Image (cartoon, rainbow, N blue to C red):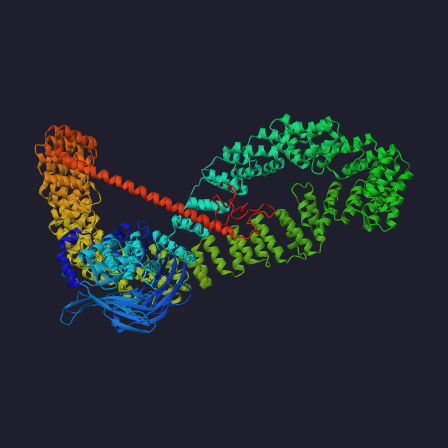
Amino acid sequence: HGRFLETATRKHRNSYAMATPPITVKEIVSLTSCGINPQCISFTNLTMESENFICVRETGVANSVIIVDMASPAQPMKRPITADSALMNPVSKVIALKAAVAGTTQDHLQIFNIEMKSKMKSHQMPESVEFWRWISPDMIGIVTNSSVYHWSMEGDAAPRKMFDRTENLAGNQIISYRASEDMQWFTLVGIAPGNPARPALVKGNMQLYSVAQSRSQALEAHAAAFATHLVAGNTAKSHVVAFAQRMVQPDGSISSKLHVIELGAQAGQSPFQKRQAELFFPPDFVDDFPVSMHISEKYGVIYVVTKNGLLFVYDLETATAVYRNKVSNDPIFIACGSPSSGGIYVVNRRGQVLLINLNEPAVVPFISGQLSNVELAMSLAQRGNLPGAEALVTPKFELLFSQGDFKAAAELAADSPKGALRTRETIAKFQAVPAQPGQNSPLLQYFGICLQRGKLNAFETLELSRLVLSQNKKVLLDTWMAEDKLECSEELGDMLQNVDPDMALRVWIKARANNKVVATLAGKGEFEKMGKYCEMANFKPDYSYLLQSTLMSNPQGAVNIAIQIGNQSPPPLDFNAVADLFLQRNMIREATSFLLEVLKKDLPEQAALQTKVLEINLVTFPNVADAILGQGKLTHYDRPRIAQLCEKAGLYMRALQHYVEVSDLKRCCVNTHSIDPAALIEWFGTLSREWALECVKELLISNQRQNLQIVVNVCKEYTEQLTADSIITLLEEHKSAEGLFYYLGSLVATSEDPDVHFRYIESAAKTGQIKEVERVTRESSFYDPEKAKVFLMEMDLPDARPLINVCDRFDFVPELTTHLYQKKLLRYIEGYVQKVNPSNAPLVVGALLDQECDEDFIKNLILSVRSLLPVGPLVEEVGKRNRLKMLTPFLEHLVSEGSTDPSVHNALGMILIDSNSNPEHFLTTNEHYDSKVIGKYCEKRDPNLACVAYKRGNCDFELVDCTNKNSLFKLQSRYVVERMDHDLWAHVLNDENAHRRQLIDQVVSTALPESKNPEQVSVTVKAFMTAEMPQELIELLEKIVLQNSAFSNNPNLQNLLILTAIKADKTRVMDYVNRLDAFNGPEVGEIAVGNELYEEAFAIFKKFDLHVDAMKVLLDSIESIDRGSEYAAKVDLPDVWSQLAKAQLALDVGAAVASYIKAQDGADYNAVIDVAKKCNDYEALVKYLVMVRKKVKEARVDTELCYAYARINSLGELEEFIMTPNAASRETVGERCFSEGLYEAAKVMFTADSNWARLSSTLVKLLRYQEAVDAARKANQTKTWKEVCFACVDCEQWRLAQLCGLQIIVQADELEEVSLYYQSRGRFPELLSLMEAGVGLERAHMGIFTELGILYARHRPEKLMEHLKLFSTRINIPRLIRSCEEMAAWKELSFLYIAYDEYDNAAGVMMEHPDAWEHVSFKDVCVKVANVEVYYKALNFYLQDHPTKLNDLLTVLTPRIDHTRVVDLMRKAGHLPLLKPYLSAVQNCNLNAVNDAVNELCIEEEDFQGLRNSIDLYDNFDQMSLAFRCEKHDLLEFRRIASYIYQKNLRWKQSVELSKKDRLFKDAMEAAAQSGDRTIAEELLNFFVADRNRECFAACLYTCYDLLRADIVCELAWTNGLIDFAMPFMIQVLRDYTGKVDSLVEDKKDRNDERVAAEKEAVEQQMNQNLYAQLLPAALPAPGMDSTGGTFVPGTIPPRGMAGYGSDSISPGGYMPQQQGYF
């Protein structure tokens, strides 16, 4: 096959250029244009698991995963995901991620659903995953170093081990893992370094594993794929595997093979023959190898793609080579199949995603023509249903048919590509073949094979159905219909209509025979199905006819149809017209149903229809109209019109709802006898306040008695709208007290209006509703009591209870008592006191006393209520009238009964006090009287008695007030001290108390000295303190403490005395301190310090041995360091020394350090360090820190000690200290030393800390550059490298600078800074040297190559092009483009534009700058530009500068340019002849401008043959202009062409005239004959007669025979003596006419024979019918005949029109009537 391809390549090199290739290559998307980093387009970063998604991992500063959906590649989805590998599911937006577990060799796997944003599964593999991919939509294949696992996406199962890797894959890079369709076979492919003799050719290894056998086979292969193939004659498909090998043979040659092998051959089936073919690699691809293989199930071909972009296409069945070509200039690293298109997707390193597929129209012609392999072309065409095989299958079919092999011919026709042979002609051929005895006919064989292959087409279905129905085997049609084997058509339905109407309906539905489907469904009454079908099929039947035909037979069906009409938008019929059709037939209900359905949307434009439906129902069915209105679905009808109709129909409520004039409303609303009261009340709510009141008034006027209840209910319901005042006024105007009572009764429960309540009481009283009056007066709280009292007194009701309620509730008891007493209603007085409210008995008694009522009546009244009577008010009322003694028996009676009521005892006390009957005994012994009341009563009579009463009841303020008024201060002081009440003390010691001094004197002199109770003393002292009376308090305390009282040694009192002195009289404090010993020294001392009594405080602390506090006073308050030093030396305590040290620290660091050392106190090391640093006294600090380190292990101590050593330059001690264990922050110390210029000390610290970065900086400062470079190498930090590098540049240490620079420039972000640093100092040669060295680094990145290119452009332009050619793929082209533009490097700029796919700009640079132009390169660029305007600029450029190469350029631009525009461009430039080769090449496009240009050039060159060919082949040109131009040409041939053009444009007369003019009689005769115009032919004949040209006369008769009339010819010939020349014409005419007459006679005879035969057949049929009628029983009536009717005698002729005879109602049997029988 390889030699065949090579030979074919050489043989058909030119023909390939002309023929259409069988493969199409289309760029689907460029990943770089989607914003994907080109460096991430590689095998490790990019995955493509299916034709649906591409997944790219971008790594760098921010890791991310980019998902390109191939359905919309311009909108990639970017997610911030960090992973080592990412795989998109083949069919859904599910992504699988793999990431290494830090610190282990394990990998963590996860599956995420991107759309649901949820994690589906995760698993941690125990070993590293080398390769993985989706082997099915729900299964992932995982390859580790030793085994292969399968991980299902469903459930929670962990990956399941499938098999172990074979030894041949050890150390291989796994590039593929594939699974067969039934998941029983798997291939694992890896690559490894190749043979040492050919190291560039990698070795491919494959493992083939069988699940059923649990075995593996090791093979050599670079790519493999599984497929299924149906072997001819088999029923099940065979599983095959294909794999490609490329191996180095022992003799050094390379063997490239393709193998196709069946897997697991099935028993009973023909095996798939093993195939092998050679993969031929051209010489330029000797080290190339396959990277991917895919098999198209659609076409049955194998695609093999190599690394260097070579594509092989092989037939799967035969392994025959079909095509080979290079499809990509860049390396291909991944590919995947495209089942939807039958092709494959490949991705190259440039980021192009290419779709490679078969070019369907060209495959079969290419294989049959270019490869001369007709058998393969046929096989592919049949398998892939490819076009172009018609010419191949027809001869074979004819051959088989002629040989009598009808079965093979039928199979060939059934399998013919695109159904080329499945035609009517083929069926006719099979029909024409007679069936052999005992065998099926060839036609049935053909149909059987077609049914096995699939579905029959329309005419096959018709013929087969006709054949089956003729054999009465309709059940076969049912089966085939259910299996969808038949193509439905309207003709098939027509055929089945009389056999099976339901099947015919199904066929029509599938065939979309809409009219017949609708007619059938309407005839069956299935209108709902009809509507759904019309909607589904988007069909609009003739609804008018359909509706009218259905109205009488099926009214409800007609309604359904009408509703369907209404549901369409726009409706096919006017709604009014449809409704009128119903109304014309008095179908009111149906019309209503239709109109209501179509008016559901309630549109304004339907107002007339709404009015119409309501009108017809109000006139005929008012209840229906009422129901329609009640639904409220219609709102746009004529409301006044409907209102009038409603009133006439007695629907007064509907009329009220529609009237809009108050006069109409008042007229209708009085018909309350016909209106539902609830509806009427609801209707009132729709009226305005004024109209509602008018209607209410109308109801009262028309019939108040009848309408009163409705009026009251309306007023109750709409009180808020109508207002209560308006309603009350209206009812009062009509003197409707009853209405007012009922109306107000509904308001009184909720209203708070006093007037409403009063009017209700008033109306109830007037209507005799006494119980309601009593209830309201008892329960209501809103009426005006004064008005109610006056009204009820005036009404003088027979029942006084309402008046009693009012007076009792609103305190009108005296007026009530007076009224009742005056009206002699004493029983009501007794009843009120005894039953209603005994508590008001005192008021009643008082009123009766005022009325001089009999005292016995009053006493009896009082005694009648006894314990219920409130004694206090009674005493008060009687006391006001000086009649207390009257109550003595009553009170004594109560006491005797054991009453403890204070009021009773108060009254008795008052009586005893007034009678002076030993009141002191009563006051001291009685426990039940009220002290305040009796005390108050006694104040004016005897103050001492009042104090006794007050003291007994603890009436503090009353007692104080009484004693103050009567100057009883001694009594008051004793009471206050004994009372021990803080509030009382606050009251008497208040500044506003004018008697305070007198009280204090009595307290100090009498009350306290007499007291032996400590609590009384304490409360008194606290009271004085609270009152802030220090002097008085001191006076009091001295009296208690210093005068040898019982409380002299009380610590609290001593404390209080000193504290009071501190606040009030500081001069006494020291004396008290010296005299007193029991006070609290620490607390008092602190208070003294707080009040600035420092000496007193010092004395107190010293007295109580509080040395620390004493030292604090000396240092902080007295501020005497000297006294502090003396005191510290005296007491010699560590705490004292520490205090002293803290005080000395701010003044003398040395002294403070000495004190700290004496105290051995290291707690304040932070403060000491800060002060020592501030004072720069590091010598003292060293001593202190050495002491502190013995007690404290703190990092700061060690850190500051290191720093102090550094500051005093004790480097030896520093190094010694660093060597010992310590907690010093070496980095901090080093940084401080570095910042302060102590570089030697910093060096020590950084060295000890192994801080190589800072050590390097320090060494730079010390000018030790070599050591700095060594330290930087250890640090290995970019910042450090930069610092050392820049320092070396400044000191011109170039070797060291380059060493550092190489470490920096590999970091892309730092490159620019280094470059700018060199350039700013003018060190361009050194910078170039650095960059050139950086290019060779393993970590060299795009920035280095780009920067070097920029430097070359600016400083070494001669090296730039070489650099670009070597590293164009590793350069940041846009950046370098700008530099080339700046430096005018045009040739290099054009190269960069080409490399960056900016072909428009590249072409522009070449045209603007001639030194950048090169013809071949420019052609390549031109065909790739995006802007078509560049084409025409290029043409102008070539026309001006390179005209000889213009046609060469046009050759490559032909498919892309507008040829019309090119012609116009060149015509304007005057160089059209220059384009003749181009014009000839593009004339097949048949463009007007091109044809005109070619014709013009042919005329100029006098090339009449070329012009004639152009006109014949291409007709798109200005034919008349060309004809006029050629007509005037000097050459005869051009004038002939003009005549020819006239003929093509049907200008026959001009053509004939021009030919006659040039004596071209043959052309003239042919033109006349072709014209078909008799006039032209006869004129030409007359011309020949006139010209006496007899030969041409005879020739014209022959040429124009069909146009010339015989009589004209005879006349001309006879008159001009040309009979002999006309005789042949006449003979032919006579023969034609004779033949026509014979045909007519024969035709008439045939028709007569047919008519006679038809009449004979009719007579025979009639006789047969009469014979059957004679055989019927005489007494048996015919079907459908009434048994009581007349009979028909067989054999007689029935009357005309009788059913069964002389009509069209004959049944299919030919004898039984269908409808009425014989009669």
Residue 553 screen position, x and y as percent: 53, 42
1550 relative to 507, above or below:
above
Query: Does 355 sit left or right of 1166 as displayed?
Result: left
Q: Which of 575/1384 is in front?
A: 575
How many numbered marks have been drawn onto this rendered protein structure?
A: 0
Q: Which of 526/311 is in front?
A: 526
Residue at the image point whose x is 12% and y is 52% from the top: 1359
Query: Does 1374 sit left or right of 1064 as displayed?
Result: left
Residue 1057 screen position, x and y as percent: 61, 53
On-image quarter of the C terminus: top right
| Residue 1096 seen by the camera | yes
1666 relative to 1296, above or below:
above
Residue 959 screen position, x and y as percent: 74, 45
6 relative to 1658, above or below:
below
On-image quarter of the N terminus: bottom left
Query: Does 1631 sit left or right of 824 as displayed?
Result: left
Which of the 4 image quarters holds residue 117? bottom left
